[in-house]
Image (tube, rainbow, N blue to C red):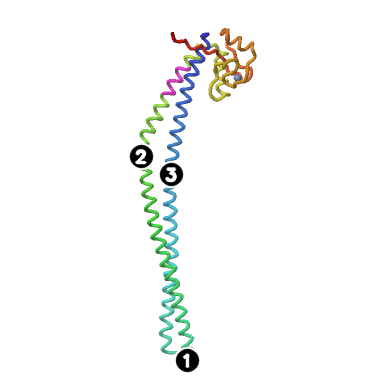
Amino acid sequence: MNEKLSILIELQGIDFKIDNANKCIESINNEIDLLKNVIKDKRDNVENLKKEITKNNVSKKSKEMEVSAVEERIKKHNMELNSVKTNDAYKALVVEIENDKKLKTGIEDELLKMMEDDEKQAANINSIQLELSKSEKEFAGKKTSFENDLKKHREDIAGFEEERKVKLDKLPQGIASKYENIRKNKKGAAVVPIEKTNCGGCHRNLPIHIVDEVQKDKEIITCNYCLRILYQKKADPVAG
Ligand SMILES: [Zn+2]
């Protein structure tokens, strides 16, 4: 294989390692984001439930004040019973007292229901807080290893970048920038083997003169469809 092609293939090998390291970094960052989101959701959840309890407390207060007002009224009407002059007025007061008693029972039932809800909410908050601290512990435990892995991949990439620079410097400017352009425009391989008479990148059938040129292995030949750089794979040495 001609030297330029060999360098291109080595360069591509380094770039694949860079791609891989970047993929690892991305997946670690995704995992970090995922854990952070889980924690944030649980924190928000607890905050919202606490706000609800505070809101409930306000309406509980106002219900309690209503009960006191009704009780006051009942007390007042009970005292008035002693001083009414007519039977009708007496009956009317009794009816009012009965109505207020029903009203009071109704409000007290609502209060009871609200207190039960509060208890449920408090239990809810407790269990979410337990989950939250579990998630926080999990994240704290993994954080160091995430950071170490990220650091290692970044250092690897810095090393690979140095290596690729050395390779690029060995190539003529035109070929180097051709390679860089293909890498930029196509995801994945920029230098591909021909497969029989097809391009190993876009898999289209190549004109015979291109296949010939590739087999001569003198120049850098590109696929006339996808512009990837082509090479002829060496046949595996046959054992024996
Ligand atoms: Zn092609």
Q: CA distance from mark 3 to mark 1?
A: 70 Å
Q: Which mark is residue 140?
A: 2
User: What residue is shown with label 1?
Assistant: 87
* Drawn side of residue 1 relative to residue 131, left or right: right
Circle 1: element type: helix
> Amino acid under label 3?
Val
Q: Report the magenta stretch's main SS.
A: helix
Q: Which mark is residue 193?
A: none
* In magenta stretch: residue 163: yes
Q: How far apart in space, not on screen, are marks 2 and 1 (Cα)?
A: 78 Å
* Nearer-the-camera pick, 213 or 154: 213
- The residue positioned 55% from the left and 25% from the top of the image is 187
Q: Separation of disc 2 and disc 3 at Cα?
A: 13 Å
**The quadrant where residue 147 appears:** top left
Q: Residue at x 45, y 18 (%)?
A: 162
**What secondary structure is marked by label 2?**
helix
Q: Which element type, helix, strand or loop, lies under badge 3?
A: helix
In the rendered image, residue 168, in percent from the top left (x then y), is placed at 50, 15
**Residue, disc 3:** 38
The tag earlier along the polypeptide, 3 or 1, is 3
Q: Are marks 2 and 1 in contact (CB under 8 Å)?
A: no
| Mark 1: amino acid | Asn
Query: How many residues crowd mark 1 within 10 Å: few (<14), some (14–19), many (20+)?
Result: few
> Who comes first in sequence, dot 2 or dot 3?
3
Q: Nearer the viewer, residue 6 or 234?
A: 234
Q: Nearer the viewer, residue 31 or 163?
A: 31
Residue range in magenta is 156-164
Split into quadrants, the picture shows ligand 1 in the one at: top right
Say which of marks 3 and 1 sits in front: 3
Q: Is residue 113 shown above or below 180? A: below
